[in-house]
Image (cartoon, helix red, strand yellow):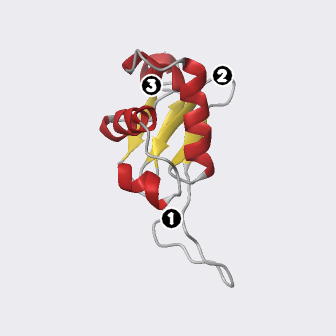
Amino acid sequence: MDKLLTQAGLKCTKQRLDVLNILNTANKPLTAEEIHAEVSDIALSTVYRILDKLLEKNIVIKTTIPKSDGVYYELTANEHKHFAICLACHKLKYIDICPIHNTTVSDFTVTGHKLELYGYCKECIK
């Protein structure tokens, strides 16, 4: 994780490493509050500042959920993932396929993409 920081020109601090390690071991995107709950010695405002800096350096990506205050973060270095997001309970479900994996655009170099599907999970649709 320290290599990610140094390659991005960021100082390698214990707090940044803690946030990166939590994101790296998570099996889903996490909110700043969920990250904060994992590290007791970092203020929530510091977690937000770290995430903003990591976002600026393209180390993390941010996903927002419509009709919710939920903002989720995940490492860009992790496996390429897409999610279906429930509009009622805000549960995220991993989608195991990528319909636009090898997309090309004329006169444009594609370096990444993000796909989010919105709807209702089977529990909320009832």
Q: Nearer the viewer, residue 12 or 28?
A: 12
In this rendering, is residue 81 above or below 39? below
Indicate which label's residue lies in the foreground, 2 or 3: 3
Q: Residue at x 69, y 24 (%)?
A: 67
Locate residue 42, reporting x and y percent.
47, 20
Camera sees residue 97: no
Q: Nearer the viewer, residue 105 or 24?
A: 24
Callout 3: few (<14), some (14-19), or many (20+) C-alpha neighbours within 10 Å?
many
* First reached walking from the N terminus: tag 1 or tag 2: 2
In this rendering, is residue 73 above or below 90? below
Q: Residue at x 50, y 64 (%)?
A: 100
The amino acid sitting under disc 2 is Asp
* First reached walking from the N terminus: tag 2 or tag 3: 3
73 horizontally vs 45: left or right: left
Residue to which mark 2 is pinned: 69
Residue to which mark 1 is pinned: 100
Locate residue 81, reporting x and y percent.
42, 50
Q: CA distance from mark 2 to mark 3?
A: 16 Å
Mark 1 touches mark 3? (CB < 8 Å): no
Camera sees residue 55: yes
Locate residue 50, reporting x and y percent.
55, 36
The amino acid sitting under disc 3 is Ile
* First reached walking from the N terminus: tag 1 or tag 3: 3
Q: Nearer the viewer, residue 71 or 83?
A: 71
The amino acid sitting under disc 1 is Ile
Mark 1 touches mark 2? (CB < 8 Å): no
Callout 1: few (<14), some (14-19), or many (20+) C-alpha neighbours within 10 Å?
few
Count of marks overlaid on the render: 3
Residue to which mark 3 is pinned: 35
Residue 58 sits in quarter: bottom right
